Image (tube, rainbow, N blue to C red):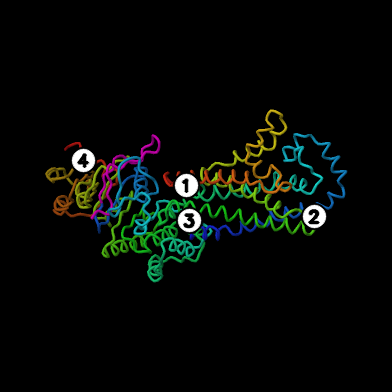
Amino acid sequence: MRVIRTEKLSKYYGQRRGVVELDLEVKAGEVFGFLGPNGAGKTTTIRMLLDLIRPSSGQVWVLEQAVWGNVGLRRRLGYLPGELSFYEGLTGWELLRYLGRLRGSLDPAYLQQLLERFDLDPSHKLRTLSKGSRQKVGLVQAFMHRPELLILDEPTAGLDPLLQVEFQKLVREVQEQGASVFLSSHMMGEVQALCDRVGIIREGRLVAVSTIGELTERSLRRVRIRFDEAVTPGDWAQVPGLKDLRFDGDWLEATVQGSLDPLIKAAAQHRVRDFISQEPSLEEIFLTDYDTRSAA
Amino acid sequence: MHILAQNLRMGRGNLLGFGLGLAALSLISVMFLPSMQQNSQELQQLLQSMPKGMLAAFGVSDQVDMLTPEGFLQGRLFALMVPLLLIIQGVGIGSATLAGEEERGQLELIAAHPVGRTRLFLEKLGLLGAALLFSSLLLFVSIWLGLKAVGVPLPLDHQLAAVSGSFLLGLLFGGLALALGLASLLAVTAYLWNALTPLSQDLAQSQKFSPFYWAVGYEPLRNGFDWGYIAVLLGLILLLLVLGLLRFRRRDLGI
């Protein structure tokens, strides 16, 4: 089963591009990361999945059903908007109860458990909450009815690292219980930690879909190593995957494509004092992606 | 009905305040009736000294006899003030509850729940209707009690006709705001059309093409219900809401 399927899905706002001919497939039971810089069309896509905005052309199926006007379908979805705006005068409780009523039922025990996990006190007015606490309210309402498919727009924005870990645990848990998760992000790290597969969207077009493993394989990394003594260019040219080698006293600097293993093996021949590996930024991943495409 | 109930709960302070304010204002005007009747000669002199155009702009045309209780209440309340206040309430709610919530992003979370567009629209319309009905009810009760207190007998159905007309105007322009997101300018135009066209002989007949005339311009306090006008107003409101609903079902939410 495909929990999400789009076919040549396009959205234009007048002349302005939203997304262009998107073909997307998310499998049941999968955690799928939708990765792209701000303004790439992630939120536009997500809003079409929820039937909040309508496609200019193309088709969308969610849980194998057409989304247009499909109220029953939304009962089975959990949604976290990218920008949360609440009725600020309500308390967290009042909002959660209201949303529960719209869904028809609420499991108080599970809700309580979620509140405890995220360390959220819902008795305060929403307008008094910090950005992080607001995000927690958003996450709790998305998970509280145990949806089959969670659609989360930038779920960890504003969460501190401890809660990001808690969020990741929760996602894995619901995945084990059979739910699927579609989450958007502009941070590689978050996606890497959570997702089985990733779709990369750029300027409204889906430029690549791959497993996390493939993505990391393909990606570039900037590595700096400091040795005990000055290094010489000598043997390093033979190490596979190294580019832009530079030497500066006892520092070696290089760009590594794919696995770090050959470099680490070679470095192990010497006494290493420091090793710095920079996670590739999203832009660098895009660049590699385009490089491999144009090479093909 | 959860959406309607929640919106009523969130707006109850405003609703109560608005309704009470409207009722108090009307009651004060009614309480002035006896002193108007005592000083009718001075009032007449005052009215005669004012330019006709200015009086008309405030809803007091030649036909309105300010020296009768019906005319006095028409001039003070139903020609402008009461319909205007109900229109303000209607347009305020109509535009805040859909367009406003869309603009603030609040509707996104609600619309992503298992709530159909039709239900969303109708419950928001229910909020508009309930609010206007509540204000109109308080208005009616205060006028009725006020007239009793000062001992001026006016037929009950005439009172009801004036309040109903004002209510329908609020619903018409509130519905316009709900359905299309625009209303204020049209409301002003409709009012001025009704108020000022009688001044020009060429335009005098066209006064009857303003919703203000159908609702309160024909002096319901003096003439009672005009079912034809009520039907026209209701038809217009219905048409507008059906078009608004059809559009709301199809369009993107502006979030």
Q: Position of residue B34 (x, y in %)?
A: 83, 53
Residue A244 shows which numbered tag? 4
Which residue sits furthest top? B202
Q: Which residue is identified by label 3?
A: A86
Dot 2 and dot 3 within a common chain? no
Residue B152 shows which numbered tag? 2
Mark 4 near mark 1, Cβ–Cβ under 8 Å?
Answer: no
User: Could you tell me the amino acid type at mark 3?
Assistant: Phe
Is residue A23 rendered magenta in the image?
A: yes
Dot 3 and dot 4 within a common chain? yes
Rounded to the nearest angstrom, the CA distance separating label 4 from label 1 is: 62 Å
Residue displayed at 19% across by 42% down: A243
Q: Label 4: state its secondary structure.
A: strand
Q: Position of residue B169 (x, y in %)?
A: 62, 46
- Subunit of label 1: B
- Subunit of label 3: A
| Main secondary structure type of the part rendered in magenta | strand
Mark 1 near mark 3, Cβ–Cβ under 8 Å?
Answer: no
Above or below: residue A251 compared with residue A113: above
Q: Label 2: state its secondary structure.
A: loop
Mark 2 near mark 1, Cβ–Cβ under 8 Å?
Answer: no
Rounded to the nearest angstrom, the CA distance separating label 2 from label 3 is: 50 Å
The magenta-colored residue range is A1-25
Relative to the observer, which residue lies in front, B28 or A286? B28
Q: Is residue A43 left or right of residue B188?
A: left
Q: Label 3: state its secondary structure.
A: loop
Q: Which residue is identified by label 1?
A: B245
Relative to the observer, which residue lies in front, A179 or B221? B221
